[in-house]
Image (cartoon, rainbow, N blue to C red):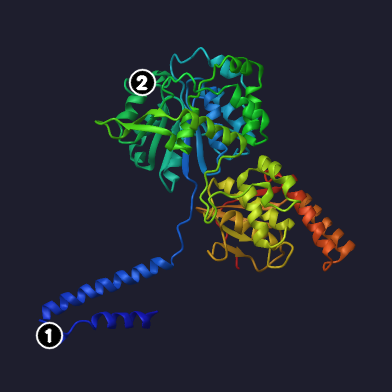
Amino acid sequence: MGMKNTGIFIHITGFINIKDMPVIKLIIQAMRKIIILISFLLLSQAIWTQPLPFKLKHTLIIDTDCAIDDMRALSLLLNRPEITIKAILLSDGSLSPTDGAIKVNSLLKEFNLENIPVACGDLLKEINPSWREFNRQINWGKVSDHQVSVLNSVDCLIENLKNANEKVIIVCLGPLTNIAQLINKDPGLESKVERIVWYNESVKPLQGFNYECDKASANTVFKSKIRIDVISNLGKDKILFDTSLFSECLKSKTLLSTVLKNVFIQPLVIEKLQQNHFMLCDDLVALYITNPELFDINIISDELNIRYNKDYDVQGIRQAMTDMINGAYFAERNIVFNRFPVQHEMFNYDIRPIIDSAIARYGYDEWKANVMTDEFHRHLGVFSIVGAKMGIKARELFGIGADMLEVTSYAGTKPPYSCLNDGIQVSTGATLGMGTIHLVSHGKTKPSAIFTYNNRSVRISLKKEYLDQVDADIKEGIMKFGLMDDGYWKLIRHNALKYWLEWDRNKIFDIEEINKKINPKI
């Protein structure tokens, strides 16, 4: 590289005829050529650098007062693999913070996302809306033993902003109390907030329940330099979570549809549903985050940081919600595909029966990872599928997208355990080519890996009972057919399909937090 660079330098400066130029002009011309050379070299370096890793579309901290429309908004956001949620804060409003924490923790349990911290804010004086008792009686999911953070909401907010490697969107579905306290307590952190997206009935004039709960805090936030997008349903009478959307929940088998169905099938809720009681309110904030093109946003001319929606596409909103409920909504960034295929006729006949069930149970992200792993691995194997599920679980634990993890695998370089590595590479984007997956060359091999992001490391291993089952199935195949018989590989494919559909990534792994980044001798 050094000899080539020297040659380029001689070639460029060789254009200068020393005899025909004054000394100063010669120097200036030479300097220009050198600058061009340096620019060329820098550009050539940039061409060969790796692409920037693709992170999830948005990183959020959510602040909620836990009305039933907050439950719908939270569910829509928790269900999206391209959304990272760093914390959920509770403010006083439709429910008290402590009552709200119970609801949120149960919802997180439904989505297998109990790693997201939950923190309670302060009580507000004289806040007790008429709908509070109704909201208190509604169950958002199974009872969870997940503990509320020892930090209060504002301190949890401060901690997450300080630790954030990028700007964060604060989604506010209730009063602005916690955000105003942040501004008063540590105004320097305003720069870590990309924007606030707040649901409120009106901006001009400022009015509505979320504003009336804590006017002083709202005024503090509006006077700050933080961009704030205010979303409202604008009082449109046809924007409802109605029986037609509920019927989509009844027909679908996705996790989102199940969570919504279990809430809206409760007697108190279904009675009001049949009365067309449930306007889409805070749900619109979730749809604005995922589909901003559906909203017509205006800027207040004398306050450029304040924006509000003056209109929105009602039909588009309903279609997006319907697609999310049915698992037909895609918000991804593929390299080759515009949309990853799920059509039955594109798959082999023994794959077709599991397509709908696998997507409904484990989500589109895992489906895509498993399909791509099998094609990359060149056969449908058990440990490659375990690796794909392991990688998706790791991304969920860290709340990040593909290409963000560094992986140390203990699966070795010999099948069957080494097949795990292919599934991990596909599902995490940590590949040999990128230099972000490392294979431990000493010690006993096992279906286990350490995943690291931002100096936090987690070890994920296949539980012993599942490993024993795989080992027993492999031994059975060898005893019956031998390794070179096609009967063995048919049995492996059959078992892999069974594990693909039956093994839940939230249940099959032992997960251990590692205190510091692991640097094994590789």
Q: Is residue 357 above or below residue 421?
A: above
x and y percentages locating residue 90 in the rendered image: 50, 28
User: In the image, which disc is placed on residue 215?
Assistant: 2
Please give the label number shown on residue 458: none
**Residue at the extreme right of the image, as rendered:** 480
Count neighbours of disc 1 (C-alpha within 10 A) and say few if under 14, some if 14 to 19, many if 20 or more: few
User: Given this view, does label 2 or label 1 mark the residue nearer the observer?
Assistant: 1
At label 2, which amino acid type do we have? Lys
**Residue that protrudes farthest toward the top in the picture:** 130
Q: Residue 294: horizontal and vertical position, in percent? A: 44, 34
The image shows residue 106 at horizontal and vertical percentages of: 62, 30
Left or right relative to 322: residue 477: right
Q: For residue 225, which quarter of the picture? A: top left
- Label 1 secondary element: helix
User: Quick one: 313 or 429, which is closer to the camera?
Assistant: 313
Taking the view exactly as shown, the residue that stands out farthest to the left is 22
Residue hosting label 1:
20
Q: In the rendered structure, which disc, 2 or 1, sits on the residue that comes first in sequence?
A: 1
Left/right placement of residue 344 relative to residue 515 reads right
- Look at the image and tell me whether residue 152 can be seen: no
Spot occupied by residue 32 in the image (x, y as percentages of width and height)? 21, 72
| Quadrant of the rendering where the C terminus is positioned | bottom right
Task: Check if mark 2's residue and mark 1's residue have beta carbons within 8 Å.
Answer: no
Q: Amino acid at mark 1?
A: Asp
Would you place residue 202 above or below residue 183 in this image? above
Q: How many marks?
A: 2
Q: Residue furthest bottom?
A: 19
Left or right of 145? Residue 18 is: left
